[in-house]
């Protein structure tokens, strides 16, 4: 996972009015664990969906019309 993606995840969290600590609490995990997963780029797709769900977002996949 690139730094751009890591920053995007945190940006979405903060932009939704949450902190990583609050999201971790809502997910039932520790702030340290969530921060480490983001930093290492080891967040699974299912975990990302849960993060987004608790902050009021969802993943939408669209076909790239340029491919």
Image: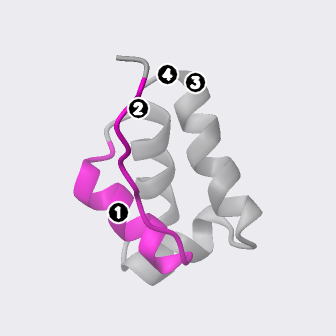
Q: Position of residue 35 (x, y in %)?
A: 51, 50
Q: Which residue is mark 2?
A: 40
Q: Please, is residue 27 above or below residue 46 in the view?
A: below
* Mark 4 to mark 3 CA distance (whole Å): 4 Å
**Dot 4: element:** loop
Disc 2 vs disc 3: which is toward the camera? 3
Q: Which residue is mark 1?
A: 49
* Mark 4 to mark 2 CA distance (whole Å): 9 Å
Q: Which residue is mark 4?
A: 2
Q: Is residue 59 magenta?
A: yes
Tell whether label 3 touches label 4 (CB within 8 Å).
yes
Q: Earlier in the sequence, mark 2 or mark 3?
A: 3
Q: Please, is residue 35 above or below residue 67 in the view?
A: below
Q: Residues within 10 Å of mark 2 (few under 14, many from 20)?
A: few
Q: Position of residue 2 (x, y in %)?
A: 49, 21
Q: Is residue 39 magenta?
A: no
* Mark 1 to mark 3 CA distance (whole Å): 19 Å
User: What segment is highlighted magenta in the picture?
Assistant: 43-65
Looking at the rendered image, the quarter that the C terminus falls into is top left
Disc 1 vs disc 2: which is toward the camera? 1
Q: How is the image coloured?
A: one colour
* Mark 2 to mark 3 CA distance (whole Å): 10 Å
């Amino acid at each position: 996972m690139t730094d751009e993606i890591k920053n995007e995840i945190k940006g979405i969290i903060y932009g939704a009015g949450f902190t990583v600590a609050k999201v971790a609490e809502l997910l039932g995990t520790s702030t340290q664990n969530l921060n480490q997963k983001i930093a290492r780029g080891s967040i699974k797709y299912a975990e990302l969906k849960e993060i987004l769900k608790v902050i009021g977002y969802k993943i939408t996949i669209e076909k790239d019309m340029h491919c």
